[in-house]
Amino acid sequence: MESLILYTGVFLTCIMLLSLYRAVVGPTGLDRIMGMNAIGSKTVVLIVVIGLVFGRLDMFVDIALSYAMLNFIAVLAASRYLHKKGYHTVPTPKGGSSHDH
Amino acid sequence: MIINAIVIILCLLGLLLFTGGTAGLLRLPDVYTRLHMAGKLDTLGTLSLLLGLGLYFWNSESHNILVLLKLLLLWGFVSFTSPTATHAMVDAGMRAGLNPWMKPDRKRRAS
């Protein structure tokens, strides 16, 4: 059972590395926010796994709880900033409008 | 014995859901489709894995009722905040004027 918990943590780390690709090369800003949110929601589980591996879950569950709150607030603030900034429609010389991502 | 089987099933289910969410995150064509995939599958994967790990901790020798209550609090918190964060991201994208992806023939007909 201990090896199951350990390999769960290893697999979660590989999944987080794959999610990092979307956070780095995402075409729009919303892609980057979404990639960081996906990584953060996997980190909460990974911290609990690390606490079980080290046998100190009483300390690590507090860290996981505060990390979940921090991730939520960070996503809300980043999406609020994106909403305020907007994807401006710049008028082209031909009179139409194109989206500037 | 039966609790060990439940823990293994919940952990593997959570990892399978995380794998599906990451595959959708990498391969789908648009922000909104990726958010649809990541929001649902990450929420259910986190909840399933936390339930399995909490059951494993409760079954082990060093179980502590206060830590178990905190894990339950974390479970409820994630089940509230993960859909809320996904909705906040979709709402910010729509209000900022990011158009959703359409099939190429439908886009040609609309314009």
Image: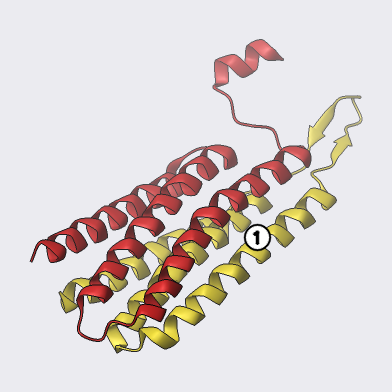
Chain colours: A yellow, B red
- Residue at (54% x, 22% y) in the render: B103
Residue under pointer 1: A75
Q: Nearer the viewer, residue B17 or A32?
A: B17
- Residue at (61% x, 50% y) in the render: B84
Figure check: A59 above or below B85: below
Q: Quadrant of residue B69?
A: bottom left
Label 1 resides on the chain identified as A
- Residue at (49% x, 81% y) in the render: A62
Q: In the image, residue B63 lies at what x, y percent?
A: 28, 82
Q: In the image, residue A22 lies at what x, y percent?
A: 52, 55
Q: In the image, residue A44 lies at what x, y percent?
A: 46, 70
**A44 horizontally vs B17: left or right:** right
**A65 horizontally vs B108: left or right:** left
**A59 horizontally vs B5: left or right:** right
Q: In the image, residue B81 lies at what x, y percent?
A: 57, 56
Figure check: B18 above or below B72: above
Q: Quadrant of residue B53?
A: bottom left
Q: Nearer the viewer, residue B49 or A91?
A: B49
Quadrant housing the C terminus of chain B = top right
Quadrant housing the N terminus of chain B = bottom left
Q: Nearer the viewer, residue B9 or A58?
A: A58
Figure check: A49 above or below A29: below
- Residue closest to the far front: B65
- Residue closest to the far left: B1
- Residue at (80% x, 33% y) in the render: A98
Q: Secondary structure at mark 1?
A: helix
Figure check: B107 above or below A8: above
Q: Amino acid at mark 1?
A: Val
